Amino acid sequence: MSIVTFYCGDPKNAPKTTQGAHLGGNAILLWQGKLLLERRVDADVWGLPGGGAKKQETARQAVSREIYEELGLRIPGKDFRKLAVYGDPGRIAAYRDGSVWRMVSADGGATWTADREYYFG
């Protein structure tokens, strides 16, 4: 059962936020021309790996930490290129506990190549 409902691009049907905007980061990871996705356990959907930034953490640091926590893959923050920042007011996440957040995400990309090996920790 989903613990979160995402509202994207339809702010009039989304619930009012109960929290301030929350910064997060997602990783676009390519290997041999294939995009890595993960099955989200909180929403039962496929998505980009990533998550929320902790206090005083940059988007690159958050993406690097989240990739390690979720996938066990160590990719230094410096290896991510900023690709896009999404902060549309309609990007809302409503959690089962009643908290409702507006999401701002900074997406970063990294590519596996023959000369750069990342490792599982």
Image (tube, helix red, strand yellow):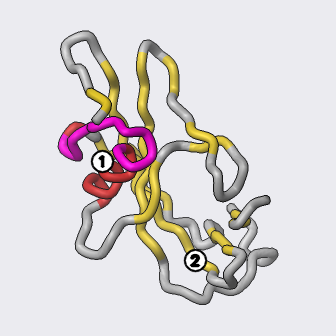
| Outermost residue, bottom side | 18
Q: Is residue 43 above or below residue 32?
A: below
- Percent across and percent down for residue 95 are 67, 74
Identify which amino acid the numbered label 2 is placed on: Trp
Q: Is residue 7 visible?
A: no
- Percent across and percent down for residue 75 are 26, 37
Indicate yes or no whether the magenta region holds residue 73.
yes
Q: Quadrant of residue 56?
A: bottom left
- Percent across and percent down for residue 45 are 70, 46
Q: Quadrant of residue 39?
A: top right
Numbered mark located on residue 64 in the image = 1
Q: Secondary structure at mark 1?
A: helix
Q: Is residue 87 visible?
A: yes
Q: Secondary structure at mark 2?
A: strand
Gap between marks 1 and 2, in whole Å? Answer: 22 Å
Q: Is residue 6 above or below residue 115?
A: below
Q: Quadrant of the N terminus?
A: bottom right
Identify which amino acid the numbered label 1 is placed on: Ser
Numbered mark located on residue 101 in the image = 2
Q: Count neighbours of disc 2 (C-alpha within 10 A) and say few if under 14, some if 14 to 19, many if 20 or more.
A: many
Q: Count neighbours of disc 1 (C-alpha within 10 A) and say few if under 14, some if 14 to 19, many if 20 or more.
A: many
Indicate yes or no whether the magenta region holds residue 77.
yes
Q: Please name whichever residue, 107 or 112, is drawn nearer the observer in this view of the structure.
A: 112
Q: Please name whichever residue, 43 or 83, is drawn nearer the observer in this view of the structure.
A: 43
Which callout, 1 or 2, points at the residue further toward the start of the chain? 1
Q: Please name whichever residue, 47 or 121, is drawn nearer the observer in this view of the structure.
A: 121
Magenta part of the protein: which range?
68-78
Residue at x 63%, y 85% (from the top left corner): 17
Q: Is residue 89 left or right of residue 71?
A: right
